[in-house]
Amino acid sequence: MSLSTTKTAAPPKSAPHEHDSSKAARSNLGLVRPDHTTGWKDWLTTVDHKKIGAMYAIFSLAFLIVGGVEALAIRAQLAFAENNLVSAETYNQLFTMHGTTMVFLAVMPLSSAFFNFLVPLQIGARDVAFPRLNAFSLWTFVAGAIVINLSWIFQAANAFGWFTPIDGRTDIVPSAGWFGYAPLTGDQYSGIGTDFWIFGLQVLGIASVAASLNFIVTIINFRAPGLKMMRLPVFIWMTLITSFLIIFAFPPITVALGELMFDRVFGANFFRVDQGGQPILWQHLFWVFGHPEVYILILPAMGIVSEILPVFSRKPLFGYSLIVFSGAVIGFLGFAVWSHHMFTTGLGKVATAAFSLLTMAIAVPTGVKIFNWIGTLWGGRIKFSVPMVFSLGFIWMFMMGGFSGIMHSAAPADAQQQDSYFVVAHFHYVLIGGSILSLLAGIYFWLPKMVGKMWYGKLGYWVSATVVVGLNVTFFPMHFLGMIGMPRRTHTYLEGTGWQPMNLVCTVGAFILAVGIFLFLWDLIRTIRKGPPAGDDPWDGRTLEWTIPSPPPSYNFARTPIVHSRDPLWAHKHGKASLRIGSVEPDPHGIHMPSQSWFPLLASAGFFVLGLSMALKQAGVPFCGYIAIAGLGITVLGIYLWALEGPGGFHVHPEETNS
Amino acid sequence: MLGISTKRLSWLGVPLLLSGCNFQARQSFVDPKGIVAQDQYDLFLLTVWVTAAIFALVGGALLWTVWRYREKKTDDPNTLPSQSHGNPLIEIGLIGVSVALLVVIAIPTLRLIWFTNDMPNDPESNLGSWFDGETAEGSDEEPLIILAKGWQWWFSFEYPQLGITTGNEFAIPAGKTVRIELRGEDVIHSFWLPKIAGKVDMIPGRNNNMWIRTDEPGYYYGQCAEYCGEAHAYMQFRTEVLSEEEFEKWVAERRETPKPPAGKDWNEFISLSASAPEELPDTDIVQGARHFFGKGTCVQCHTIDGTFAAGKLGPNLTHVADNRSLAAGWMENINPDGSINREQQLENLYEWVRNSEHIKPGNLMYYDPNGLQNVELSDQEVHQIAVFLQSLR
């Protein structure tokens, strides 16, 4: 679509740029850059935020399936009292890996997929600020994810008798819970599964922090002319806040994991009680990370919904500034409520009271968002597209999760709810009903932009119906299970407890939910393969990404847009002439594109070697200490070469190509 | 449209669920029987009502808005709906209402935090004012204190003022405030007796405590509520609330130590067992006791008061046959009327010693390096041990 209202003269002819050839350039090291490649080589070396976003999405959906299968195994085991489908040890590994996988390998990277794909497109930029760092974040995430999940392979090897850790313990898959409370994670109580968990999470933390720094720099510096902070799409604001949360929340968990590593690998005594260690220290460090992590999972979801509701209500977001501000307040307060996960640890009266009140306070900015979403719908003309149905489902389910959250904030009442199925119900309403529904809404909304194909048929509605029904059938009864006293993380239960009928209902619900996810994947694949062309702007969108072709060209914007209002495309289509999107005079050199590189992948591969061999070192596999050092060496080498090869780059001339 | 209707449909399921849920279930916190649990339940109900009211208002507003402002065929596609983008008065007003509703919850919350954390001033409950039996020196001005310890994966309960130690089942007097000191002996556990009080954690290296009080005698079920490793699900306990007189009787009974199955005292029994076993009668109970102290290696971890069995790693077995459950509550031998089913108990004791690794995964009685995994016992020997254990009452 042509958007230029600023008449510009044809670009002056100039001498071709020195790197303009379509042949691959050489880096400062004299090596050939992997530019203009195709196939797997292109995907492994790409620095294009759109391809990186797509890979984040593919990996996270794959891990969503892994975590989902783990959840189904958990539910199948609990369907009947005194069931023995899986052993207690396997069950403990399943719930540990389910939590770890869903939080770190499914929801966070799926949010990251949106950050990657959307941030440059919504702010009118060519790419993120540090494209190679972006590739490094992706591959480091993959490295950490594989380190953790390789434990299943070693567990299988153990079952066949091919691999036995030196301490003889058979819990090779992490089994100490996603929260890994000391001293259960100490070497006297758990096997090398905990080491896989420690090193996997450390590597994932590096990936998250690197990605967050990239997004913060990008959002602050790469906005199109006129796109002031208070004109940013809410999704970009939530990305910015989430990125700040990540860079402040990950240091505590890094420290905690480091201390645990010192305890286990080098015999330190941070958490060993008999040597004066304090297990409670772990809980503080973990939850100083763990609670902001909750908002890291939900704020992007809130951003996505805040983008979708105005489009299908055909109205601006109600109370934009308040939504942005409440997001920032949630992020800030998120660091002040961590001890509400520890109400039963004997904090004392004053600390309990303070954390109780602060937790209640966080309900206010959250409520503000819900009020504003309803305000956005109010007076609009609501079109029930699939993304909109998911978004409305999100508001409803997230609200219900919020209510049980308020119930937890009353500390004395929480003494009964904590670590019971009531809590399980609560956070699955906010994580599935909140994060997952919103991420699905986002996929339905932006996939046409990503792949240039449009959804077709009614399958999307069936997906939303099945997911919402499955979610409620699974998790609503869990409130009652908690009320009648079923504790979390229990492998089985006695017949006499009266928990059997509800558990069976939950299990049926889990399988309905699984059918919903399966239908979604089917819809996704058939749309990517056979969907009709989407066009630039299939939904009558409001933001800059809908001004460019679908799928977007590698350079994103042929001309950098000039923005004069919030919701620039909407103003361009329906507003005053003075609010139309302008465009910056193109550079006669063309658009500078960054060169691709192998070195981010190499640096990440070093982390993989480091993490895996540190875990195996604990199992007594010979030479692993040296291999770990070599892995660190590979990482350092990768970063060194990456620094020396220079940014490289070449130019493209979209307008010449078009004409 | 489909999304909305399914949401409504899911609410139709709620009454169905309620009918399938027994709120009087034995670990239900919505059937409180103690003062602390009652107050916590009242606060919970307050939060439920406040949130239900918000739910009705906000959920109703959401549904109404979605229905009222849905796209209609009669809408003119060439016009836009009102492009309003905010109203500071409405926004500030809604924030004010939210804060006010939270204050409604916050005030009783604060009151109850202080109430549950502070031991109530209740001189009537001091041991000196009601307990007639012998007590440790200086304990008359204290309430009954129970030292509850969490181990992987069972509970021990010590009564330091009364000189009693029990495993996995304990008793308290009705109508008296009792102080419970909580200790974690290996990893973190949590003491949760839902009908009497919410949970407090048992953390190694940290001296937590709580108080409980109930006026209703009965048999109550509790469970560990903090994930503590492989057999976390199998870590349960029972509490018997007895009237004052019955509690005193219970204390007197629990203070009695078991008599040897033969011989005039345990010293003689043990020396005969070692040097002249043929002089002992050849009964199951005698043989069982010999295996217990001998090849069964039970004494390494278990204590029987009054004998030299003084192991500290497993439950105190002095009155193990007075318990209505075995294996930290996982195996039950209780009749519907609350009395002990002796047949079931013997069967359970046999099964537990014979097959504990299948009954309670990872249990240390079997998997400890000194445990039963390295002890050869015939079925008959296990039966004899079970008969001996059943005599401990």
Image (tube, grey):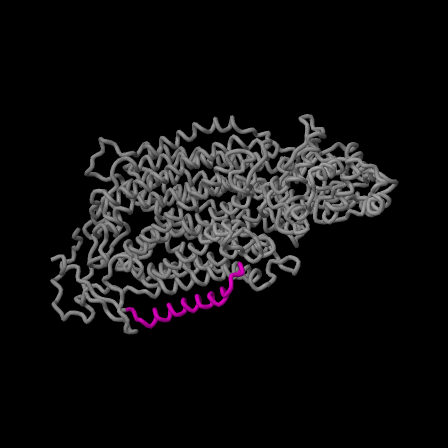
A256 up-or-down from A454: above or below: below
For residue B182, say whether it is visible: no
Question: Would you say A295 lies left or right of B177 here?
Answer: left
Magenta stretch bounds: A618-647
B328 up-or-down from A18: above or below: above
Please state the horizontal and vertical placement of residue B371, each as a whole percent of the image. Answer: 67, 48
Q: Residue at x 26, y 52 (%)?
A: A565
Please state the horizontal and vertical placement of residue A39, each as a whole percent of the image. Answer: 26, 57
Q: Looking at this view, is A65 or A393 the one in front? A: A65
Please state the horizontal and vertical placement of residue B99, each as a whole percent of the image. Answer: 48, 43
Looking at the image, the residue that sits furthest to the front is B278
Question: Would you say B281 lies left or right of A273 here?
Answer: right
For residue A202, say whether it is visible: yes
Image quadrant for the C terminus of chain B? top right
Q: Is residue A635 magenta?
A: yes
Image quadrant for the N terminus of chain B? top left
**Magenta part mainly helix, strand or loop?**
helix
Which image quadrant for residue A315?
Answer: top left
Report how many numbered discs are placed on residues in the image: 0
Q: Residue at x 38, y 47 (%)?
A: A301
Q: Looking at this view, is A246 or B117 the one in front? A: A246
Please state the horizontal and vertical placement of residue A132, each as a whole percent of the image. Answer: 33, 63
Looking at the image, the residue that sits furthest to the right is B264
Q: Is residue A486 magenta?
A: no
